[in-house]
Image (cartoon, rainbow, N blue to C red):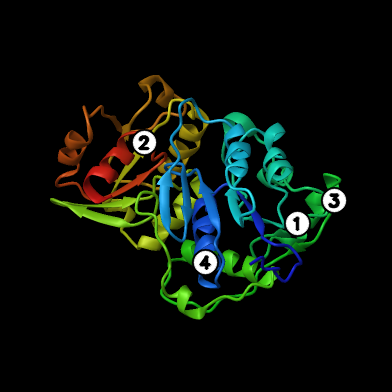
Amino acid sequence: MVHTYPWGGEWVRILVTGTRGKSSVVRLLVHLMASCGMDPVGRITGVVPRQISPRGERVIRRLCPSSVEEMRWWIGMNPGRSLVMENSAVRPDLQHLAARWLKPDLVVLTSARRDHQEEWGDSDPLRVLLLGVPLGTPLLVPRGMGERARGVRDLLGSPGPVVEPGPLAVGGLPEVAAWNLELAAGAMEFLGLPVDPISLGKLPGDLLGDFRVVSGRGFRLALAFSANDVESTGLLLRSLGWDVGSLTIWYHHRPDRPRRLREFLRWIRSLGLRREPILTGGSRWAILNPSVEGRWIRPADWREMLQRLGGMGDVFGCGNVSGLPLELIRNVWG
C-alpha cells in the first residue's frame, strides 16, 4: 500500500550536511523514522562508508577511491524509498551535486566550523556548505544560527525557509549528542512526523566513530579522533573534566591534511601541557611549521600502539581516525 506523508509525498528525502555530526544525525533520523513506522535507508561516510536501515547495516565496498558519484549511484540503488543521505562532497564546487541528485524535502545543517582547509582555505565554512542548498529548499540549522544562515542564503542567491529546532528535554546526554538529537527531532517535527518518546531512550550508537572513553592496562583513552576540527575537539576535551596538565595528547595525522595538522598543533600548544604529546601517521616534516614539543612515533601496528599506551594514564586521542586509531578501535574496543 502506498502511504502519503503529511507533506504530500510518498516518501521523504533528507540531505544532511555540515563539518561535524553528519553521520550521527543520519543515524538518528533513520532510527526515529523507523520508530514511527517508516522504512528508511541511510548512507553515512564517516569512519567507514555504510548503508543503514531498520534491519541493520552493511559496509559499502569500494572498488576504487571514494568519489561524489557514489552518492548518485546509491540513490539509484534505492528507488521509491525514504532516504537520509550525508553530503560527502568536500570541494566547494561540488557541494550542489548531492541535492541535485537527491532532490531533498529538507536539508539539515549540523555544524559549520573550520575544517577542510586544504580545499576551503580561509573561506567561511557556512558559505561553502550552503552552496549545497537549492533555491527554495527548507533548511534546518542549529539553534542560534538561523539569522546568519538566512543572510548567507540571500547572498548566494538561493533564499528559502530557514528553521531552527525547539529545545529537547532529554537528560543524561553529552552536549554534542544532545545537539545532534535536537536536530534530528527538529527535522521530524518540521516534516510532520511523530517522534516516539520511547525511541529517544533507545538511541543507536556507532562504536567505531562515537566519542567515548575506553580503558586498558594503566591508561584511559578518550576516542575523539572523529571530531576532525579544533572547536569540536576542544568541546569534547572540556566535557571530560580531566586535568589537562596531567594528560597526554595523541594526535594522529593524515598526510593529505597538513593544514589540519597545523591548526591542531596551535591548539595543542595553547593547552599548556606538562606532558609532551605523541604524534603518529604521516611524515615528520609536516610537524615543523609550527613547531611543537612532542614525540613522533611509528608503531608497527595496533598491537604495538596498545603496548605504548600502557601506563600513560589519561590519553586524549584526536586528529584523524583513519589508519592506526581505527585499527586499534576495531580490534580492541570495536
Q: Residue furthest front?
A: 1
The answer to whether the residues at label 4 and label 3 have Cβ atoms under 8 Å apart is: no
**Marked residue nearer the N-terminal end (4 or 3):** 4
| Side of 128 relative to 115 (left or right) | right
Dot label at residue 67: none
Using the image, determine if residue 280 lies above or below residue 229.
Answer: above
The answer to whether the residues at label 3 and label 1 have Cβ atoms under 8 Å apart is: no
Foreground residue, 119 or 241?
Answer: 119
Mark 1 and mark 2: Cα distance apart in space: 34 Å
Q: What amino acid is at disc 1?
A: Arg
The answer to whether the residues at label 4 and label 2 have Cβ atoms under 8 Å apart is: no
Dot label at residue 34: 4
Residue at image mark 3: 154
Residue at image mark 1: 148
- Crowding at dot 3, Cα within 10 Å, few <14 / some 14-19 / many 20+, comes out as few
The answer to whether the residues at label 1 and label 4 have Cβ atoms under 8 Å apart is: no
